[in-house]
Image: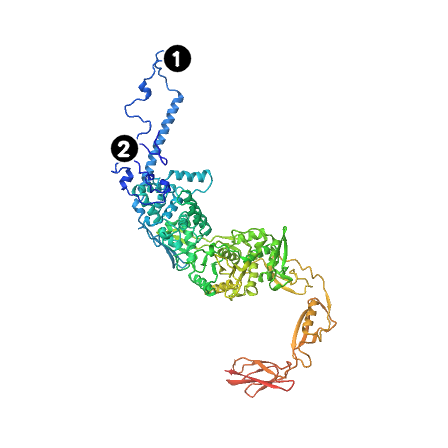
Amino acid sequence: MRVATKRRMVRAGTPRRTDPSASVNHPIRAGRAHHLEGRDEPMAQRRSGRADGSSPRPRPRSGARAAGTKSPKQAAGRATTRPRTGKPKTARKATRPTRRGIWVRRILLFTLLVVVAVGVTGCAVYAQMASSLPDPDATKGKGRDQSTIVKDRNGRVLARFFAEENRQDVELQKIPQHLRLAVIATEDQRFYEHEGVDPLGIARALYTDIIRGEKAQGGSTITQQYVKQAFVTSEKTLRRKIQEAILAQRVERKYSKDEILELYLNTIYFGHGAYGVEAASRAYFAKGVDKLSVAEAAMIAGVIKSPGRYSPYLEPENAQLRRDTVLKQMLGEGYIDQATYDEAIATPIETKSGKAGAKTAPYFVEWVREQLVSEYGEQAVYRGGLNVRTTLDREMQAAAEKAIADVLDEKGDPSAAIVAVKPGTGEVLAMVGGRDFAKQQFNVATQGRRQPGSAFKPFVLTTALLEGVSPEKAFESGPAKLQVGDQTWSVTGAPGGKKGPMRLRAATEQSVNSVYAQLILDVGADKVVKTAESLGIREGIDPVPAIALGGLETGVSPLEMAAAYGTLAAGGKHAEPYGVIEVLDAKGEALFKAKPRTTDALDPAAAALTTDILTGVIKRGTGKAASIGRPAAGKTGTTQEYRDAWFVGYTPDIATAVWVGYPDAQREMKSVHGRTVTGGSFPAEIWARFMKAAHEGIDEHAFPKPKGLATVKICSETGGLVTEFCPKPVSALVLANHKPETCDKHTEPVEVVVPDFVGMTKADALARIEELKLVAKVTEKQLTGVAAGTVADQTPKKGAKLKVGQTVTLIVSTGEAANLPPVPSFTSPPTAKVGQSITVDASGSTDDGSIATYLWEFGDGQTAEGKTAKHSWLAPGTYEITLWVTDDRGEKASITRSIKVQ
């Protein structure tokens, strides 16, 4: 029987390390005392367990015999007679080995040879792996570190990542006890018991991962995590794990536990470029590590497991849950009492960064850094000397930041985000995730999940077009109460309380909710979800009618919206957005080269028709403030209670999403600069400012019109293909394979008898003409004896018969003539050649529009009459042409112009 302590077996003949439980200062033994001071005994004494440093005498196993002693049976002697007969025992005869015995021996021999071979091979592999490991002292030095350089698309440096740029070592005794305990509780509860590698921890991780089918916490000890930093790359291979285990054991033999803990806490990565607890404390709370509270210490300890996933800036909800888990582990281990736990768990995480971030495009640089760390690991990013070229356009980035600063320029203004991508490739050209990176590291551009409001309507529109709905189809535009299952859906109508039929194109331009509510019920929410996903909206869309108005489960990010609208700009080709063009290692060898990932997400004709409709939003609709003087399409979006406002739009060259709102409190924006913030206000203004600057030096391009489109005549009332009897036909662009049905309202001619409009007021006459479904043309004249605003004449006359849609011309008086003199004018070329015949053309006006005579004088003694005349000069010089006009009252007037004859 072996003698065992509570925590581990002590093997006979093996020197034992001093049991940490022997000291009352040990945090796990001695009643969980909250103390982690360095050990006072010398290293040799601690390792040997004796005051003089010598090894203790090996303890025999329980029941082991001293050399030369006999067992109880030997001491008593073996019986020499058979129990039953009492006859002497006779020797057995020698027998030949049986066939079975031979095979057993062979198997045993083979097994022995295999074991020996495996042992020899294992020793050789171990020796080879161990020989290539750095010395334990090398884990302290970082002399071979090389910074990673991040550049823009043209090779100009944006940022550098250094392992030591944000690190300040502190002694263990200056690190708060509750922070040390928090790290031990969550990272390595048996830290003071194992010797660098924890078999129990590994077994527990395997059990959790394999038997229970859950994600294991991992079996790496604090020592193993520390020695990982001796390696530049972050391989995840069995060889690397074995090397880490060997080096961890060497470090354990070299340094005391407290020394290892101090080294670990000063070098481990905590995210956002912070190495060590002092840098982490300043990065997250803008204070020294010695000032951390229990709740803050637990949050920092929780970040170690996954700095990106548990960053309070990037994932505040995850950070809160992780901190609470650490506090529960500290309570369970007895490191804090219930009162301390209750106080800490109730404390909200309130970060206060002392980090300024990259000077240029900090949100973009941080986005790229997260991707690099995820792909290559912290060691490679901060020590491996990577050379990274990104997609960022520095000039466009500056324009994006300036556009936000110029529009939202007052204290207390909401924040804003911009993402610009290149259609067809997905390259991210500019990114702003908030107004101030130093105060807000949360990147709304990539991480914000905000409700898009009506900016989601183009996905409904595109789906409807694919389903054969004409953009000229008429819908009721007033407020609507629609039945959805057993519930009633109340939706607002057109702005200004307008009612009546409205074509889909116009409803898109004016962002009429009731029309789009009817539309999604017609085409089906599930089809809209598929369209949105194919264009680039990847998650958070439930197939419910509310998505027609932007009511999503989790919202969308500006990056997603820019990429999705970019699909429309690229004629239906979706490109996944990306920010890294290439990554080179320290030797200049390529680790990664980007290739645009594109898919044919949408029929080009449907994309072009959607674009054609969205251009009207900027020309005539809610997005007029987004006009940039070149072909552009887009859509506004405003959520309920004015908490989010969007403008997302594109040209053939750039697709850009702009969001405005308060990222944290989600306050209403009903009074910003004295205005209510909608998608057509600040977002559209920011978008226009940025896009004008971004397109400097880019030639103007029209949106392409691919095959599959057709221009047809439709009835303006019904949206159907026009018949010969439709009163108001208009031209419309439609999908060639989804032409609208023929108008079913105007199927036969309707004759109207023209009434007498003379003497009626202009307003009454126009109202009567509209009732008769005729078209009015009005000509106004100054007439003597006819009151202003009165119909003086009409064509055709009373009693004539017209078809619906034909025109009646009204002559309406503007009042008595003012007896004004005529006002002549004429056109002529500024120069002429000798002998060249030129033409002069005159027009004039009087109070009633009649000119009686025209007389021309050409400056060479020659004259001519008539409204037009021709003349030539025989000698060079400058001549004056004078036009005299006389009206029917005898009033005269003239005008003179010069001409140079050469």
Amino acid type indicated by mark 1: Arg
Left-right relation of 336 to 473: left
Residue 449 point in image, percent of width and height: 50, 54
Quadrant location of the N terminus in the rendered image: top left
Q: Up-down: is 321 above or below 511? A: above
Q: Up-down: is 135 above or below 388? A: above
Residue 252 point in image, percent of width and height: 32, 42
Left-right relation of 131 to 594: left
Q: Up-down: is 391 above or below 877? A: above
Foreground residue, 71 or 205?
71
Q: Which residue, as the protein is rendered here, is positioned at the far bottom? A: 861
Amino acid type indicated by mark 2: Arg
Is residue 735 in view?
A: no
Foreground residue, 104 or 665?
665
Left-right relation of 92 to 894: left
Q: Residue at x 61, y 86 (%)?
A: 892
Residue 352 point in image, percent of width and height: 41, 56
Left-right relation of 176 to 487: left
Color style of the picture: rainbow
Q: CA distance from mark 2 to mark 1?
A: 49 Å
The residue indicated by pointer 1 is: 84
Q: Any mark on residue 57, and which? A: 2
Comes first in the chain, label 2 or label 1: 2
Classify 10 Å Cα crowding around label 2: few (below 14), some (14-19), many (20 and above): few
Classify 10 Å Cα crowding around label 1: few (below 14), some (14-19), many (20 and above): few
On the image, which quarter does residue 827 sit in? bottom right
On the image, which quarter does residue 508 sit in? bottom right
